[in-house]
Amino acid sequence: MVNYTNLKNKYYDKISELINNLGKPVTLYFKSTITNVNSEFNDPIHDRSLRKPSYKSTSTNNSPTEVENTSSITALIQYNPSDFQDFGINVNKNRGVVRLKSFLETLDDIKRCDYMIPNSDLSGVYSKYRLIREPQPQGLGESKFIISYWERI
């Protein structure tokens, strides 16, 4: 008789080892944040509200500053997987698809990000990818990992 609990635990342990040991860093990019904006403008309650918008001065530059928001995850990366069509994904260029396998904890960040750039072993060589389908949970009975498909932009 096969002990399925031991089998599932071994599967989860080995996939976790693969992601942790062989996974590559992937940088997720979110919408930028604008800083240095003065919050006192356009207040319809106070008399001072008739002033034009102004900016807080942190140095000699009085303009707003755009701050890039990123997060880094570790994932197994497969370029040009053949199974993406099995999930009902239609893209114009089959050569531009990437599959990531990562931990379930990365789901919210993956769904929120605008695009991602996987780590390249070649210095200065990178491509941006956008999510082309909702990430799919993976596991034996309980989801501990997710698979996501991305298209080059």
Image (cartoon, grey):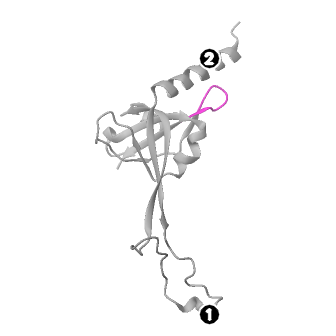
Where residue 97 sits: x, y (%)? 37, 39
Where residue 68 sits: x, y (%)? 44, 57
* Residue 145 in view: yes
Depth check, mark 1 against mark 2: the one in front is 1
Foreground residue, 101 or 38?
A: 38
Where residue 2 sits: x, y (%)? 68, 9
Q: In which quarter of the view is residue 94 placed?
A: top left
Foreground residue, 14 or 5?
A: 14
**Could you give the CA–CA distance between mark 1 and mark 2, rounded to whole angstroms?**
68 Å
- Residue at x 45% of width, y 25% of height: 22
Q: In which quarter of the view is residue 67 placed?
A: bottom left
Residue corresponding to mark 2: 10
Residue 47 badge: 1
**Callout 2: SS:** helix
Left or right, 75 with respect to 91, comes to: right
The correct choice, above or below, for 144 with respect to 128 in the image is above
- Residue at x 55% of width, y 38% of height: 136
Count of picture labels: 2
